[in-house]
Amino acid sequence: MKYTFSKTRNSLQIKIYLSFLFLCVTSILYPQSAGDLDAPQALLKRLIGNRSAEFQLSVVEKKDKILPDWFEVETDNNHVKIKASNNTALCYAAYTFLKDIGAVLISWEGNRIELPKTWPKYSKKANTPFEYREYLNACTFGYTTPWWDWKRWEQEIDWMALHGINLPTAMEGQEAVWQALWKEYGLSNVELESHFAGPAYLPWQRMGNINSLEGPLPQEWFIKKEELQKKILERMKALDMHPVVPAFSGYVPKAFAEKHPEAKITELKSWSGGGFASTFLLDSKDPLFKKIGKRFIEIYTQKYGKSNFYLADSFNEIEPPVSEHNKYEELSNYGSAIYETINEAAPGAVWVMQGWLFGDNKEFWTKEATSAFLSKVPNDRLMIQDYANDRYKVWENQEAFYGKQWTYGYVHNYGGSNPVYGDLKFYKDELTSLLKNPHKGNVVGYGAMPEGLNNNSIVYEYIYDLPWTKGEQPLNDWMVTYLNARYGQTSKSALQAWQLLLESVYNVKYWDTRWWNDWAGAYLFFKRPTLKITEFKGNPGDKEKLKEALAVLTKEAKKYNKKNLIQYDLIDVSRHYYSLSIDEDLIACVKAYEHKDIAKGDELFKKIEKQALHIDAIMSGQPLNSLDQWVKSASDYGSSPEVSSLYVKNAKTLITLWGGEGHLNDYASRSWKGMYKGFYWPRWKMFLEALKKASINNTSFDENRERESIKNWEINWTESNK
């Protein structure tokens, strides 16, 4: 377009031209659509109120997709000017600024917000080598989020954006799609009622591990979750996130298998030795595989819109039903079938899979088996989420997944079981080592994928800063900034307490004793009672240094008001220390009664009871870590007494019996108010009293009978609406 000036052109025309020219230049330098900044601006307003108007946000799109995400922050004339590559980077930049100046710290347990009257002088630039920052395990949707409403999800999505997360797993609402799909294939309401698991157990049905457990699934669940998922995806996308949504991985209902005897369907043995109902896997070469998979994505897209990332896990803790003589070809067929199905239904989309199976079953998933499974999928159309690097070293053993895209991360939390632990130095050292490793392959993402939330906030705060600092910031410097934002100041005593915590509990990358002798539970106290605890060698960490940290933190907390987050941290440290003490005392108590030292056994019995009730009492200061809160949220999610009762039983069973006959009981044990007094101590009290009685009467102690009696008590507990 050509413009010329004439002597008759008036000043108004000149101003219009200059304004147009300015807009053209601005659109080239800072291209963005009209509504782009609504989501981050609204998030900031939810966080800091009207002061959000003092933030000037600009998205500068990347011209080259290979370039990393970046941001720039600068204060000028009491305004905070932020430029970034996208909305998620903008949100992370804003939070980094607020945290760096000690004004804001957000966490699951509460936020601290104390804004200065004027913004201090500040300038910062940062970028990350990771295109994606991932979050949420497929199992989180059972262990943590089943009863969340939109208000709670909105808080979590805000938390994600402020921590720079742009690849969240988004599994809600899919049962409405499955229901519609299977009805198209002739399944009745009655048949589907006997298929769907209860709400707390849906993640494992989605992964092909179980069917029908603790169901049926009420129809209102389908409706509520469909509406919820629409809001979740809309908000995530508005913040420039890339939600990972479900796809078909081959599992079909039993009724479908019965209606299609011509189809090649394998009935799989019970998962995890738990006595669960069989699941049914459709062979990848069967013509129905692609037909069903494509139709699922079509219905999903009709309900929720298009997606670019689809999660499909065919063999999560399940050995593939392949023949020995043609093993690798059959594995490659499964891989290609899943990819081709997604590609045909959503051209250009990426198949996402969890890398957990490769570490969980190393015997089957050799290099030859894994490379065969992935061989027929283009490198840029598959992403493997290798998120268990605090437990397995899968990517190193699998040649960084043979050219495919992959993401590096940690589970950290298993089952929502919440001992106080993590390993900040390990995370830092691992990241710096990864970035320098010439054999890291096409690693495109980083993050955490916990099964349970609302615990050990410092772990996640640190993990999501690491992609931007690249591990170059000294840990002590980061800790000063963190405590200043969390407590409002960083005293010498607070730093001393946290240094001791880093040396005592936050130097543990995996809480290995949560699986001890094949029994689950965060502490011995949380495991179903047994005489074998006398063989226990001890929990990880350094209990003596933890005791020192507790003493310093107890004294320091008195200097702060009752609402300061230091009080929450003090409760965390206290309940962890005393839980470890109970474990030691339980061992001594069992030994005393076995050796007929009744007086010593009684003394320890009373001590254990006192400590358990003490922990239960002090945890009133952590209302989210409460059995009552968990049960109430489940009950409130139902719209009738019958549905609420089903939800409550799901909620109580998941965190105790889990639902099977195998070793999963107490897997999701919780260090919560109500659990010490109402569940863990009553079990051990029954056991210890029976052991004492046998010792006094010189009769043999029938441990199996006592454990069976305790199991029956547990069943009654889960079925009670109290």
Image: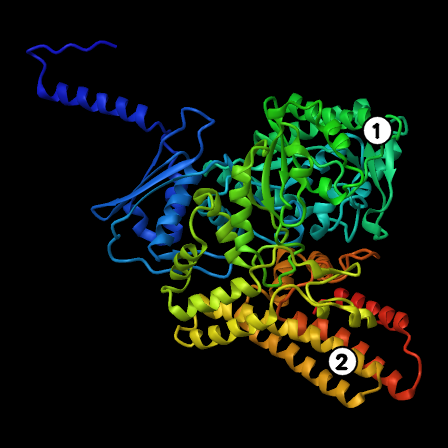
Looking at the image, can residue 564 be seen?
no
Q: Quadrant of residue 352?
A: top right
Residue at 77% across, 50% down: 216
Q: Give the class, few, some or many, for how many residues have Cα within 10 Å of label 1's Cα (few <14, many ≥20).
A: some
Query: Residue 336 location, x and y as percent?
Result: 72, 24
Query: Residue 631 location, x and y as percent?
Result: 65, 63
Q: Secondary structure at mark 1?
A: helix
Name the residue type under label 1: Lys
Instruction: Count the labels in the image.
Output: 2
Q: Please say if 664 is above or below 382.
A: below
Residue at 71% across, 34% down: 180
Q: Quadrant of residue 124?
A: top left
Q: Secondary structure at mark 2?
A: helix
Residue sitting farthest toward the left? 7
Of the numbered discs 2 and 1, the one sitting upstream in the chain is: 1
Position of 154 with respect to 370 (left or right) is left
Q: Which quarter of the image is occupied by the N terminus? A: top left
Q: Give the class, few, some or many, for how many residues have Cα within 10 Å of label 2's Cα (few <14, many ≥20).
A: many
Foreground: 688 or 56?
688
Q: Which quarter of the image is occupied by the C terminus? A: bottom right
Looking at the image, can residue 638 be seen?
yes
Q: Quadrant of residue 74?
A: top left
Query: Residue 520 location, x and y as percent?
Result: 74, 60
Q: Which residue is mark 1?
A: 327
Q: For marks 2 and 1, give the CA distance.
A: 53 Å
Residue at 35% across, 27% down: 31
Q: Which residue is mark 2?
A: 589
Position of 268 with respect to 636 (left or right) is right
Task: Say if mark 2 contacts mark 1, CB within 8 Å.
Answer: no
Q: Please say if 485 is above or below 467.
A: below
